[in-house]
Amino acid sequence: MTIIALEMPGKPRVFARGWIRFLGLSPATCLLVFFFALPMGMMIGMSFHNPSSQGVSLLSYSRFFTDGLSLLGFWRTTLMSSLVAISATLLAYPVAYYLARSRGRWRSIVFAIALAPELAGVVLRTYGWLIILEDRGFINDVLLHAGLISSPLPLSKNLFAVVIGLTHVVLPFAILSLTTSIQGIDDNLERAAQILGAPRHAVVWHILLPLSVPGLISSFLLSFTMAASAYATPALLGGASFKVLATMISEQVLFYIDWSFAAVMANALLILMLVISYAGIRFEAGCRQKYQSVAGGMK
Amino acid sequence: MNRVISALFWCALALVIAFIALPIVVVFAASLSPTGDVTFRPWEWTVKWYFDLASERWLGPFWLSVKIAIVVSVVSGAIGTVAAYVVAYEKFAGSEVVMAALLSPLSVPQIVKGVAVVLFLSVIGLQPLLGTPALIAGHCVLALPFVVRMVATSIANFDCNLFRAGQILGANQWQRIRFILLPAIKPGVLSGVTFAFIISFNNIPLSVFLVRPGETTLPITVINYLEYSLDPVMAAVNVASMAFILIVIFSFEKLGGFSAQLHGGSK
Amino acid sequence: MGRTRLIFTVSAFAVAALATPLRAETLVVNSYGGPYEAIIRKAIIEPFEQRTGIDVVYDPVGSASQDYAKIKATRGRPGFDVVVMTASQSLQGCKDGVLEKLDANSIPNLAKLSRRMTETAGPCGAVHEVQYMSLLYRTDKLATPPVSWSALASSDLAGRVVLPTFQNTMAIYLVEMFSLMNGGDLVDNLAPGFRAVAVIAKQSIGFEQSSAILESYIKDGTVWAMPFWSGRAQLLVDSGLPVDYVKPKEGTIPLVATLNIPIGAEHKDAARKFIDFFLEKTSQEAWVGGYKVGSARTDIDVPAAVRARQITSDADLNSLHLPNLTTVAERLPKWAEQWERDVVAHAN
């Protein structure tokens, strides 16, 4: 009986020739180049272009910074996204903790409920909030009938409504992100503290929350970026006077067809996103270092 | 004190779950109510709004959305799978850079992608592409990173000893791919395809700029209508749309069982 | 194997479904959405499609000023063939050279319209409807009908009014009226008008663009009085709601709505047929009856009830304040910014 010693260096290659590789990548490359890379490049270039003159011009940029409305829209976008990120992260925490720590049948149900709204689409959920919050909507109807208020509370067509609607939209992603990070916290730490006699509030305050900080921050940043680029919810729940960057950009593109100005606003939004994402990556790397040293190699 | 904390936790959990479910329940109730106000009087419920859906003004956009979603999921599924295979399995020099490039659209907001595409098409004079072709291409760009990521994960979990075993047993390249690799990455591919379908069908920010009168997708038609009125037919449209998506997911699950992908193991 | 077949059939179906079959002539009509779409479809579009066999594609995106911005930005090739705008945009578009000139040779029914009314819109607009800005109020909430526009600023209507956004033409009309009432005029000195409307904005529940949403507020009693188009106001009265509308003592401004063809439209012949159809006697009668508006045609049968309260004759038109629409069109963008700064910013 012969022992066949199979020395197969490296991974078995399915395709011997290298050009097959590029063949495989070419459809994806074509698609991304023609419908992503080139358009993005052209858009960035367009922002430096002035329709009435040739060559490079900063006209649209100066309009962005001086006309008052653009910067107001930028500020509104940032404010709205921050509020959404805070509330989404806070609301996501209990659910994420539950999903991270529990097992069994109920877990799947909660998981499904947490993610199902994403399938419903943004419009269904935004429309739902509109019905709930508007002046003759669900909440006001109940309060008026109960005699608690005499005229409707202005709950819709303002920042409040948009924040609620967007929180609802980004919540599934915040939950998913937080669940993953809480799963990364060794639950033995909590158990050890309890065995040693710590009451639950101490466990939460001294162990759980500090270790959750990286996850909380990345959930915050994820929610922020999703909210900043949202279009449908601010348009429907914010009313005509609540304009954020996304709705202002769409107005420029659909009606005024001022490509240059639209490109400037789009670049502004892009820069906002990239700055926030970059901050997130740096923060996460820093936190991981800190965590390694604190946990002292425990996990 | 422990009990207080526990109680607070369960309360918070219940409230958040209620918050998540509230708008969906409300829309469902509104779609059945005779006046469109939200009432929970089941004896007054009527399905008359659902009959309004049978008209061309809703069916037209619906079919367009379905057509586009099918094409997008097939195309991005195929392109993404092949690309993911090349990058994740072959692992040549610079494959990490290529992977990053394939995933790069994720970091750009959809609305910016949409503006870029419509600007690009207008400037190079390909405006007639707006409508169905631009929508398909735009949605593919949107879906591709997700497909690539899901398939790549599947491939990363693939045990290449299986290939060796096939080689030993005499299978040639194509047989190895067809009978060993493809079935193993099926959950990843199918979850990518399903995801692409949902993203395409429900998409708004990207599609806003790529539609054209007469070739408008269902979600865009709905938000255009909502700018003018809060007709209860909207509620029926939304509920029907969600039901459709659930059916699609259910069918895909039956076809390929990608819940395995979610649980991280083989079925 | 079965799965491969399935994928192939699905793709084949998709490709087949995508291939658009040869269609009849098409026409893209841009107008307003929501419930208005239902009215215009029934009264005008469906009969037109039946008569001519032309396939009408309805484009509900954009208010009149947004549509005009698009026409101008695309130099007359906005993607639609016929659009509903107002006399203001018609005059401006003619001047800017982005709207097609319409004449009675290609659109015979133009000759049947009152000369005075067609003058207001110029050679690039076909007047298909005339309304005016009225003051709509709840008869069950107000003890006596309001007689003046200043009722909107009175303290008993605090939190009981709603204002349109600037995209809705009523906004600038309101500013112009209040200007007239406070020592300014219709086009040159609007500062008193902006000040007065800013005061109303403080007690308004907000700003809305579409008439359909504005009217929902007065329907459920949230709002007790608001400016509203006379035709739609009449529709509300007819629907049995406890509302009524008046032409305040200071007068008001008419809305001359027009059909226009962008100069780069793809289907100009079909567009002209559509306008001619809309201006026919039977169509105008259907429109007047269905939408409760006034018509520029001089020879139609108008129900007495409509004749009493809508603009149906030159005399009616002359009794109202008509600003120089060309000047209005020129200054509209500047006024839009002033509205944002002086009115919206000071609202609650």
Image (tube, coloured by chain):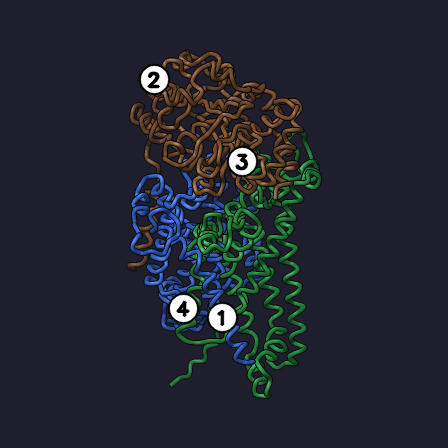
Chain colours: A green, B blue, C brown
Residue A117 figure quarter: bottom left
Q: Chain of mark 4?
A: A
Q: Chain of mark 2?
A: C
**Residue B206 placed where, x, y %?**
50, 46
Any part of residue A193 in sight: yes
Residue B1 figure quarter: bottom right
State the mark number for residue C301.
2
Along the polypeptide, which appears first: circle 3 or circle 2? 3
- C-alpha gap between disc 3 and disc 1: 43 Å
Q: Chain of mark 3?
A: C
Pointer 1 residue: B11
**What crowding class fits label 4: few (fewer than 14 Cα within 10 Å), some (14-19), or many (20 or more)?**
few
- At 61% from the left and 33% from the top, the residue drawn is C197
Q: Amino acid at mark 4?
A: Ile
**Residue B90 placed where, x, y %?**
50, 63
- C-alpha gap between disc 3 and disc 2: 33 Å
Give SS at disc 1.
helix
- C-alpha gap between disc 4 and disc 1: 17 Å
Residue A44 figure quarter: top right
**What crowding class fits label 1: few (fewer than 14 Cα within 10 Å), some (14-19), or many (20 or more)?**
few
State the mark number for residue C164.
3
- C-alpha gap between disc 2 and disc 4: 65 Å
**What crowding class fits label 2: few (fewer than 14 Cα within 10 Å), some (14-19), or many (20 or more)?**
some
